[in-house]
């Protein structure tokens, strides 16, 4: 007998499961770049030129607001603080909050001015207040992005104003959105506001999905001549949240229609399925020379996976581990893996950990167990 032996236990021949890698594309889009991801599982539902450099236009403002949210969360800035309006901020063209020259504007007003009204002027006010200049703030944005995974994104201004070196990707915009939603639940609410009035001027949120009964609660549109029409959006239905980034659409009308259709498709064609909760036993494994003869293998985290609804039949989830597991065993140490597979779906592996600690037998116990193994082929 070979020792230790690899044991494979099929938990269910048709257990519902899924994977994090991208699935085969089943829908077309006019967008030049597109990326749709399930926020909880990381399953990529659609990608088209998702790593291609592109101008982010006003979708850049998600990162500007992210930087401000971090200051608020750390207590370095308060919502009631007021930032001064420079001539540079006042003079900027494009979409505006219409901040008066020489005035001071509350931080909470500036957040709404950026998120709801897409104010380029509000962005410069924030940048100058937090970093002294928009150039310095842009460098800080790029550096902060590198810290949480933006490897290609470069910011040259705070608003997305056209600049040849101001670039990102659809995938990295989705990462900024995910980071914002996860890190700042107390402030993310501003992205769902439909309109805001400042300086006597009422403006509506430019995100077309917010006006549809589809669960949208953010984030930001963008448009420049070079980039076309874009949208970074988040939609939540029940416990499931989808993040979508599209760019390069030909018109506002196409942006509204295309994005609504893509979101409906993502929720209709894919579903999340819970396999095991964190700490839930998956399988018992034999222990070699331990004070206990078996140890439960448990899920390290809640195991939730995404898959096409049509692929749920025939899915297999298999526990794979070496048995017996040599003692001593520490609770929490990885002791195996779950292998999730199905025809047409990329194989996914998830860790299994020891649910309990198992001490090693003393010298006499180890000798007895070894003799028993030599005589009987197994621990008795």
Image (cartoon, rainbow, N blue to C red):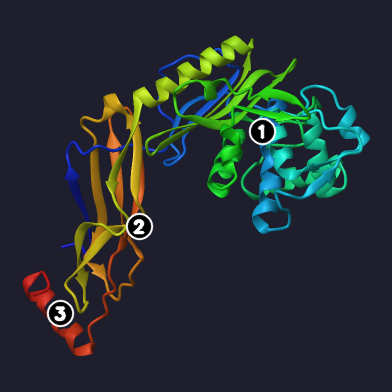
Q: Position of residue 110 (x, y in %)?
A: 74, 38
- 305 vs 183, left or right, is left
Residue appearing at x 25%, y 30% in the figure: 312
Q: Left or right: where does residue 304 sit relative to residue 360?
A: right
N-terminal label among 3 and 2 = 2
Q: Which residue is mark 2?
A: 300
Identify the secondary structure beneath mark 1: helix
N-terminal-most mark, 1 or 2 = 1
Position above or below: 247 against 199: above
Image coordinates of residue 175 in percent, x first then y, are: 58, 39
- Quadrant in which the C terminus appears: bottom left
Q: Residue furthest left?
A: 376
Q: Which residue is mark 3?
A: 369
Residue drawn 58% across the image and 47% down it: 184
Q: How many marks?
A: 3
From the image, state whether disc 1 or disc 2 is nearer to you. Answer: 1
Residue 115, labelled with which disc?
1
Q: Secondary structure at mark 3?
A: helix
Q: Residue at x 18, y 75 (%)?
A: 292
Q: Quadrant of residue 328?
A: bottom left
Q: In the rendered image, is residue 340 in sight?
A: yes
Picture coordinates of residue 45, whole percent (x, y): 44, 28
Quarter that holds the N terminus:
bottom left
Q: Earlier in the sequence, mark 3 or mark 1?
A: 1
Within-10-Å neighbours for mark 2: few <14, some 14–19, many 20+: many
Tell me if residue 293 comes above or below residue 11 in the rendering.
below
């Amino acid at each position: 007998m070979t020792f230790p032996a690899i044991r494979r236990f099929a938990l269910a021949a048709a257990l519902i499961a899924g994977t994090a890698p991208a699935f085969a594309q089943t829908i077309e889009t006019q967008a030049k770049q597109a990326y749709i991801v399930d926020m909880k599982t990381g399953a990529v539902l659609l990608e088209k030129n998702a790593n291609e450099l592109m101008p982010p236009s006003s979708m850049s403002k998600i990162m500007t607001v992210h930087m401000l949210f971090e200051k608020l969360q750390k207590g370095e800035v308060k919502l009631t603080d007021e930032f001064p309006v420079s001539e540079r901020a006042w003079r900027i063209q494009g979409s505006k909050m219409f901040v008066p020259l020489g005035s001071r504007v509350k931080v909470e007003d500036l957040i709404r001015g950026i998120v709801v009204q897409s104010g380029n002027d509000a962005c410069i006010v924030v940048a100058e207040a937090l970093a002294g200049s928009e150039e310095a703030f842009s460098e800080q944005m790029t550096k902060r992005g590198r810290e949480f995974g933006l490897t290609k994104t470069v910011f040259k201004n705070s608003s997305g104003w056209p600049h040849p070196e101001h670039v990102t990707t659809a995938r990295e915009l989705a990462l900024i959105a995910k980071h914002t939603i996860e890190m700042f639940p107390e402030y993310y609410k501003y992205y769902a506001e439909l309109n805001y009035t400042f300086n006597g001027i009422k403006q509506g949120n430019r995100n077309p999905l917010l006006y549809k009964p589809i669960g949208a609660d953010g984030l930001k549109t963008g448009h420049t001549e070079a980039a076309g029409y874009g949208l970074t959006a988040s939609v939540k239905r029940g416990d499931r949240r989808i993040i979508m980034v599209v760019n390069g659409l030909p018109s506002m009308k196409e942006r509204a229609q295309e994005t609504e259709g893509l979101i409906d498709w993502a929720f209709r064609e894919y579903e999340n399925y819970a396999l095991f909760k964190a700490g839930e036993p998956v399988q018992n494994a034999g222990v070699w020379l331990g004070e206990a003869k078996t140890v439960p293998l448990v899920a390290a985290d809640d195991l939730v996976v995404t898959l096409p609804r049509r692929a749920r039949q025939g899915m297999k989830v298999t526990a794979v581990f070496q048995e017996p597991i040599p003692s001593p065993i520490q609770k929490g140490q990885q002791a195996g893996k779950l292998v999730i597979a199905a025809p047409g779906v990329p194989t996914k592996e998830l860790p299994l950990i020891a649910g309990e600690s198992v001490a090693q037998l003393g010298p006499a116990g180890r000798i007895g167990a070894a003799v028993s193994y030599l005589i009987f082929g197994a621990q008795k």
